[in-house]
């Protein structure tokens, strides 16, 4: 996609497909990644809305708290191994034996570590539940421990598929695991199993995804990729060293995602966790396009043996994500209350204010996967650590100060402020490493925010409380028109962009 009237080289270049060299092209991989994220969004949205309405704030709060505890423990089961392995797979794209060796070395590190952490969490479920003064947490935590093992394995192997440029394989994992989790969770909750049934569904889904990931790994790399004995000592140490640089950043990311729920649970109780996590889960669904683009582009920033970093792809991806995420701001800020009531029900009315305060987080976190994964593939993991530590420290301090005073809204403010440090700093890292023009990072943001302001003005004319069906429809159409018109007037959206968008379909058919 061109920017500023210039065609960016390398974004749609033809690459061999399925020959073991470089995998699929950027456009094709991004499209498959988008299909993956749309599938995840569909399953997640259906399951979240079902659980929120079926379990209510208290029951959903127990499930969300158990999930948060489990995800915190994934940090110990991960220790940076998955992203480190992905980096080295990307560097050896085109050498099937070398990629298989990387995967095998990573598995030798990951399997025993994940099994140990999962077992310890299972055994500690009772004391953890007692610490939160909520005995109903015990079995959900135990089942989340089972899910943790499957999730850890699927994350490692799925990351290697992305790194080698075969994102299409991840779609199979998502479809299988998502369908099993949704079907199992719905059935058990309807039978009266409550939060425990939802946790069982999560465990079943991740177990299926992990098993399928092993099968696809053998098909992609051969049995050598799952050989757990002998060889690879040098490669294992190499992965472990880079994982050590990543683990601090991983810890910050996990804390970003879960510290709010844990602090709310400790200070306000499980019901308040539900009021916060429901809109947070909704905002996560809005970030999937950014993840899709990042999975297609970030591996191409690696300085591989046969390829140079694709700077043009990064500039284009950044701009596309900025324009998409900015379009979400006006509905979230102006219509946060009606959206929360429509999706979650009247019991979650307070979630509307949470959603509004999460608007900066929504905008910035859409860019987070691109610039954070990009920094990893550029070998900048150690330079990310101070940024991550500063951001998560700010999040914790703001939470501790504001949650006791203004409730769950304080956690939303803390999250948004933390990302206001985390994301711009990562943009700076990537831009500086690649020597890109700062105008390419700042101008799209200014123009997109101006367009979002125009959309907000339209929505305000229709009201900020309960909306009729015609108001939803008029707001969506007229607000989008105002957004696009403003982008065109500022020069951010051009006819060349529209022609480039039309050319995506032929590019996909040609395997680019």
Image (spheres, rainbow, N blue to C red):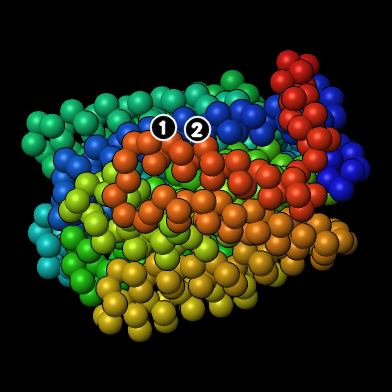
Q: Compared to 114, does 229 lie above or below? A: above
Query: Is disc 2 surrounded by few (<14), some (14 to 19) or many (20+) residues within 10 Å?
Result: some
Quarter of the view holding residue 20: top right
Label 2 and label 1: CA atoms lie apart by: 6 Å
At a point 86% along the width and 59% down the height, the residue shown is: 436
Is 134 positioned to the left or the right of 179 in the image? left
At a point 9% along the width and 31% down the height, the residue shown is: 191
Q: Is residue 406 visible?
A: yes
Q: Nearer the viewer, residue 268 or 350?
A: 350
Residue denoted by label 2: 38
Quarter of the view holding residue 227: top right
| Quadrant where the image shows the N terminus | top right
Q: Nearer the viewer, residue 409 or 294?
A: 409
Give the numbered dot on residue 400. none
Give the numbered dot on residue 42. 1
Q: Is residue 373 visible?
A: no
């Amino acid at each position: 996609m061109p920017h500023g009237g210039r065609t960016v080289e390398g974004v749609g270049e033809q690459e061999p497909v399925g020959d073991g060299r470089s995998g699929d092209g950027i456009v094709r991989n991004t499209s498959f990644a988008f299909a993956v994220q749309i599938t995840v969004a569909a399953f997640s949205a259906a399951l979240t809305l079902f659980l929120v309405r079926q379990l209510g704030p208290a029951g959903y709060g127990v499930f969300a708290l158990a999930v948060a505890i489990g995800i915190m423990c994934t940090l110990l089961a991960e220790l940076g191994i998955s992203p480190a392995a992905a980096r080295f797979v990307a560097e050896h794209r085109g050498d099937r034996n070398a990629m298989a060796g990387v995967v095998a070395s990573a598995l030798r590190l990951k399997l025993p570590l994940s099994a140990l952490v999962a077992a310890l969490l299972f055994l500690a479920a009772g004391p953890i539940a007692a610490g939160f003064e909520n005995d109903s947490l015990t079995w959900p935590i135990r089942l989340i421990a089972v899910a943790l093992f499957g999730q850890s394995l699927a994350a490692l192997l799925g990351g290697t598929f992305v790194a080698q440029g075969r994102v299409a394989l991840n779609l199979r994992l998502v479809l299988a695991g998502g369908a099993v989790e949704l079907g199992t969770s719905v059935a058990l909750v309807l039978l009266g199993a409550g939060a425990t049934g939802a946790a069982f569904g999560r465990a079943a889904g991740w177990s299926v995804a992990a098993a399928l990931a092993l099968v696809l790994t053998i098909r992609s790399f051969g049995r050598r990729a799952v050989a757990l004995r002998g060889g690879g000592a040098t490669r294992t140490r190499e992965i472990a060293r880079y994982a050590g640089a990543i683990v601090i950043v991983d810890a910050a990311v996990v804390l970003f995602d879960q510290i709010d729920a844990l602090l709310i649970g400790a200070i306000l109780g499980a019901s308040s966790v539900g009021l916060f996590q429901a809109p947070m889960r909704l905002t996560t669904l809005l970030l999937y396009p950014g993840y899709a683009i990042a999975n297609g582009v970030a591996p191409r920033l690696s300085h591989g043996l046969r390829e140079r970093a694709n700077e043009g792809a990064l500039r284009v991806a950044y701009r596309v994500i900025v324009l998409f995420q900015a379009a979400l701001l006006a509905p979230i800020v102006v219509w946060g209350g009606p959206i929360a009531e429509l999706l979650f029900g009247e019991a979650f009315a307070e979630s509307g204010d949470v959603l509004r305060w999460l608007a900066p987080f929504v905008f910035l976190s859409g860019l987070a996967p691109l610039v954070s994964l990009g920094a990893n593939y550029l070998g900048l993991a150690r330079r990310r650590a101070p940024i991550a530590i500063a951001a998560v420290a700010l999040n914790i301090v703001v939470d501790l100060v504001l949650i006791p005073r203004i409730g769950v809204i304080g956690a939303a403010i803390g999250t948004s402020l933390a990302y206001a440090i985390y994301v711009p700093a990562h943009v700076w890292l990537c831009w500086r490493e690649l020597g890109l023009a700062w105008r390419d990072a700042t101008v799209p943001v200014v123009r997109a925010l101006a367009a979002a302001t125009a959309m907000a003005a339209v929505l305000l004319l229709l009201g900020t409380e309960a909306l009729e069906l015609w108001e939803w429809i008029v707001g969506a159409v007229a607000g989008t028109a105002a957004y696009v018109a403003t982008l065109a007037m500022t020069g951010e959206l051009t006819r060349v962009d529209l022609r480039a968008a039309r050319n995506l379909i032929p590019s996909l058919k040609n395997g680019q």
